[in-house]
Image (cartoon, grey):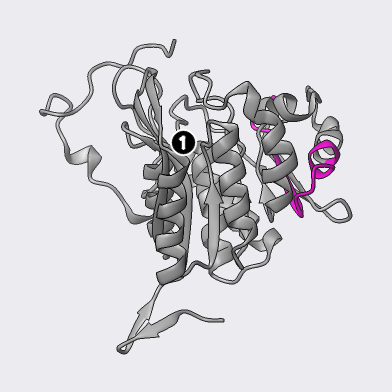
Amino acid sequence: MGPLRGHGVVIPPRVLTVAGSDSGGGAGIQADLKTMLALGTHGMSVITAVTAQNSLGVQGVWELPVEAVRAQYRSVVDDIGVRAVKTGMLSSSELVEAVAELIAGTDAPAVVDPVGVSKHGDPLLAASALDSVRTRLLPAATVATPNLDEVAQLTGVRVESEHELRQAAAAVLAYGPRWVLIKGGHLPGDAVDLLTDGSEEHWLRAPRHDSRHTHGTGCTLASAIAAQLAKGQTVPEAVAAAKEYVTGAIAAGFALGGGIGPVDHGWRLGRARDLTPPDAPGTCGPSRPAR
């Protein structure tokens, strides 16, 4: 199915993110919507939690009631419809189970990013919710996109070398997602990820960029995959295109505040940051090491 047309205007593919809000704008709902726009889709949102967050970490989290999350989802899906869904921060077992039920009942591919901790190490998923992620959310996923810390949290498998990515993938696939993308970005050497459905494998490699400004990488990748799926690509095609987009966004990452800055979601669109004097109002001061 191609793009919809309304009154002679092409309507972009619709993508829905179900995730938490990042007040600093680098991850979560904000990163998802920026990514979806950059990739030519119409992003919509279901907010599951509000965070007080900046470049130094997460200072507070306020979870929304399950009924508010369910109402947002039904409001969007029942009227506007979706071509793909992406899930991110779901902090409690109640939220995980409600969202799993919603996406399982939606006729659209679902990209599940099983967010466990923030880039700064702040926990974003209650320990009591892990079993719900394993038994309810992962089985509803078209693609699950855990990083190595999340693989260990969910399966107990700890990956220290590239050849162990297959073991990690098998452990996650055992919970029922159709595909799993194991993100090996924490391993030394090139950034290598493994995409597999248990029968075919796709190894995705990209040069590692020497930048600590990588806030929002996981959210951005999952959203990019969802956007590409909404445009009709297969899972391997969508993941390859998303990897290319995220690699460019990491290379263009920039400093904000005193900690870890975000990737640049608009890197393909060009930027005028170099035209802004370094002491202009609203720009950040010298970067300090991340805690």
Q: Using the rendered image of the protein, determine whether residue 191 is visible from the camera's viewpoint.
A: no
The residue most toward the left is 281
Amino acid type at circle 1 is: Gly
Residue numbers of the magenta segment: 170-188
Residue 181 part of the magenta-drawn span: yes
Picture coordinates of residue 247, whole percent (x, y) = 53, 44
Q: Is residue 14 left or right of residue 208?
A: left
Name the residue tied to disc 1: 216
Residue 76 percent coordinates (x, y): 41, 62
Q: Residue furthest right?
A: 199
With 83 as the anchor, is 261 left or right in this view?
A: left
Residue neighbourhood size for the residue with mark 1, other residues' Cα within 10 Å, grouped as few (<14), some (14–19), many (≥20): many
User: Viewer-proximal residue, 69 or 43?
Assistant: 69
Nearer to us in this view, 28 or 235: 28
187 is within the stretch colored magenta: yes
Q: Quadrant of residue 199?
A: bottom right
The N terminus: image quadrant? bottom right
Please say if 101 is above or below 134.
Answer: below
Task: Give the residue displayed 22% in from the left and 18% down from the top.
Answer: 285
